[in-house]
Image: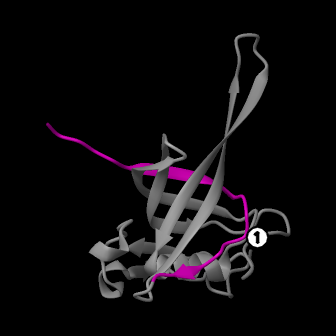
Amino acid sequence: MASFNRVILLGNITRDIELKYTQSSLAVTELGLAVNDRRKNQAGEWVEETTFVDVTLWGRTAEIAGEYLGKGSSVLIEGRLKLDTWEKEGQKRSKLRVVGERMQMLGTRGNGGNRAGSESHDTQSASADSSPADSSPADSSPAVAGGPPDDDVPF
């Protein structure tokens, strides 16, 4: 049976980035992403619905997010869904999150967010695994494609 696990999200970061490192010096960050949907209801009125998604970034992608992104920054994330399960006080719990494998910064929203101005960086993880034990820093380093736009652009 074939399967396909791919997610593409475009939204705004809900809190400042906290960059952490595993014992093997692999960078990791958890960020909150707010994704808005605007549609008409049965009465013909426009309704906005916001979905909050937790995203995990690994390696160089996490470091770039920590350096350039902040609360309110617009970002496109491509990755896969992962179900986390745990037990707390005898209750089984679970949470669906996104493991980001590619990130595209889209600039700032208002004056907040993207601390480096409106630079655009595209990062892609060669192997963005959610389990640091299965990947070494060399395996999880993203290849950085693109870069900041030329300063000579007249707009």
Image quadrant containing the N terminus: top left
Q: What residue is drawn where x is 74% and y is 74%?
A: 155
Q: Nearer the viewer, residue 122 or 92?
A: 92
Residue 17's place in the image compared with 63, above or below, is above
Q: Report the residue that reaches farthest toward the left.
A: 1
- As shown in the figure, which amino acid type bears the numbered disc 1? Gly
Residue 52 at x, y = what percent?
Answer: 64, 46
On screen, residue 24 versus residue 104, left or right, reads left
Q: Report the residue that reaches farthest toward the top.
A: 43
Q: What residue is drawn where x is 46% and y is 62%?
A: 100
Q: Nearer the viewer, residue 41 or 13?
A: 13
On screen, residue 155 versus residue 130, left or right, reads right
Let me know if residue 11 is in the magenta part. Answer: yes
Residue 93 at x, y = what percent?
Answer: 49, 43
Which secondary structure, mark 1?
A: loop
Residue 4 appears in the rendering: yes
Q: Nearer the viewer, residue 66 or 133?
A: 133
Let me know if residue 149 is in the magenta part. Answer: no
Residue corresponding to mark 1: 113
On screen, residue 86 versus residue 12, left or right, reads left
Span of residues in magenta: 1-22
* The image quarter in which residue 99 lies: bottom left
Q: What residue is drawn where x is 79% and y is 19%?
A: 45
Residue 126 appears in the rendering: no
Residue 40's place in the image compared with 52, above or below, is above
Residue 96 at x, y = what percent?
Answer: 48, 46
Q: What residue is drawn where x is 65% and y is 75%?
A: 18
Residue 131 at x, y = what percent?
Answer: 35, 68
Label 1 crowd (10 A; few <14 / some 14-19 / many >=20) = many
